[in-house]
């Protein structure tokens, strides 16, 4: 089992140790789950009392923080230092060994860079172009004519449809589908007939796609995801959408076809956006909002249908007062009825 003394940890992190330097640390844990052999950390926003209540053997703390509860190591950036030591005790195991599994099925037309990694049962079609350092995990399906930029990682069972383009250093989590047919049908004949699906999907550089997310191909042109955009799990992006640079799109968002977003837009969990909507630069859309009209740049909207955040908060306050207002209204009605009876007399 891997272990380090507190002195060795302090040396590795360039930190300042106060307390027992020979304590053996064999694991890392958050404060609430720590044991006497665990290293924990006092992250920003954590109360010192939470450290005092913890069973941790030692802790990483900001510079200047002192306690007699346990040995502490002062570091400039607590979160970064803890991440480094976590990786030491629990190294990432998702990286494939460089090379090509003999169980992979690769078309002879594909040129394989020397530093590529392709796992078992991956399937790569004709005329696929793979950049240097690409990692393709087990069970990935890449159809004909796809281009994948250098350093991009595809996790197990990702499917990339024909002619799609992925930029450099992208990360696509397990089960994502890039370039599936859009949900566009011609019903003029009385039957629903799938319309043309002749476009593709183009991901920019440094794009990340969450598990089980689906991005539909364009009808004739491209569905585009801008550089640096991060997309969470189980997101649906419809055909012909153009998503800007550095967007943050949280879990279970649904974006209907031909929607466009500016740069640095944020969509919280379970947002739904109607088709042909424009979302401006820097707009923030709250969780579970329903977007039925364009969102201006820099706006913050919530609710169904979505309205500006402050307006929506006023509505919620008013809704909370409805039972009281109803009682008051009934009392007024009763008083009015009594007055009317007196007037008749």
Image (tube, rainbow, N blue to C red):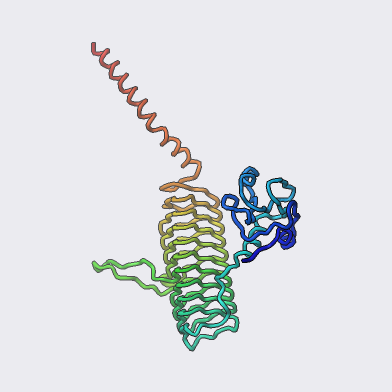
The image quarter in which residue 218 lies = bottom left
The residue closer to the viewer here, 269 or 16, is 16
Question: Quick one: which residue is furthest to the top in this view?
Answer: 345
The image quarter in which residue 28 lies = bottom right
Query: Is residue 80 something one can see in this rendering?
Result: no
Q: Is residue 165 above or below residue 265?
A: below
Query: Is residue 293 something one can see in this rendering?
Result: yes
Question: Quick one: which residue is furthest to the bottom in this view?
Answer: 108
The image quarter in which residue 133 lies = bottom right
Q: Position of residue 269 (x, y in %)?
A: 47, 54
The residue closer to the viewer here, 151 or 38, is 38
**Residue located at (48% from left, 78% from top):** 146
Q: Is residue 63 above or below residue 139?
A: above
**Residue located at (53% from left, 83% from top):** 100
Q: Is residue 159 above or below residue 244?
A: below
Quadrant of image for the N terminus:
bottom right
**Residue located at (41% from left, 71% from top):** 180
Q: Position of residue 242 (x, y in %)?
A: 49, 64
Q: Is residue 2 above or below residue 115?
A: above
Q: Position of residue 82 (x, y in %)?
A: 65, 58
Quadrant of image for the C terminus:
top left
Q: Position of residue 148 (x, y in %)?
A: 53, 76
Disc tally is 0
In the image, taking residue 200 as reference, residue 204 lies left or right, namely: right
**Residue located at (37% from left, 25% from top):** 328
The residue closer to the viewer here, 29 or 97, is 29
């Amino acid at each position: 089992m891997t272990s380090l003394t507190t002195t060795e940890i302090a040396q590795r992190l360039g930190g300042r140790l106060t307390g027992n330097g020979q304590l053996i640390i064999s694991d890392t844990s958050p404060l609430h789950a720590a044991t006497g052999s665990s290293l924990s950390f006092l992250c920003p926003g954590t109360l010192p009392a939470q450290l005092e209540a913890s069973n941790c053997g030692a802790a990483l703390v900001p510079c200047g923080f002192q306690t007699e509860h346990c040995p502490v190591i002062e570091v400039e950036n607590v979160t970064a230092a803890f991440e480094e030591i976590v990786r030491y005790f629990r190294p990432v195991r998702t990286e494939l060994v460089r090379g090509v599994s003999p169980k992979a099925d690769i078309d002879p037309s594909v040129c394989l860079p020397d530093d590529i990694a392709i796992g078992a049962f991956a399937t790569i079609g004709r005329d696929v172009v793979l950049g240097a350092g690409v990692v393709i995990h087990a069970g990935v399906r890449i159809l004909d004519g796809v281009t994948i930029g250098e350093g991009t990682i595809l996790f197990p069972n990702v499917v990339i449809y024909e002619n799609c383009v992925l930029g450099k250093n992208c990360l696509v989590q397990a089960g994502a589908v890039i370039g599936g047919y859009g949900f566009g049908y011609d019903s003029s004949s009385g039957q629903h007939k799938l319309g043309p699906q002749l476009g593709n999907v183009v991901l920019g550089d440094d794009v990340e796609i969450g598990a089980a997310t689906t991005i539909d191909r364009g009808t004739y042109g491209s569905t585009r995801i801008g550089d640096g955009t991060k997309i969470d799990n189980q997101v649906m992006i419809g055909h012909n959408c153009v998503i800007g640079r550095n967007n943050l799109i949280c879990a279970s968002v649904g974006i209907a076809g031909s929607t466009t977003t500016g740069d640095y837009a944020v969509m919280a969990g379970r947002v739904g956006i109607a088709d042909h909507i424009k979302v401006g630069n820097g707009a923030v859309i709250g969780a579970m909002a329903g977007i039925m009209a364009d969102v201006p740049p820099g706006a913050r909207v919530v609710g169904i249908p979505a309205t500006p955040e402050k307006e929506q908060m006023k509505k919620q306050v008013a809704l909370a007062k409805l039972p009281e207002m109803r009682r008051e209204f009934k009392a007024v009605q009763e008083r009015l009825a009594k007055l009317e009876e007196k007037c008749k007399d």
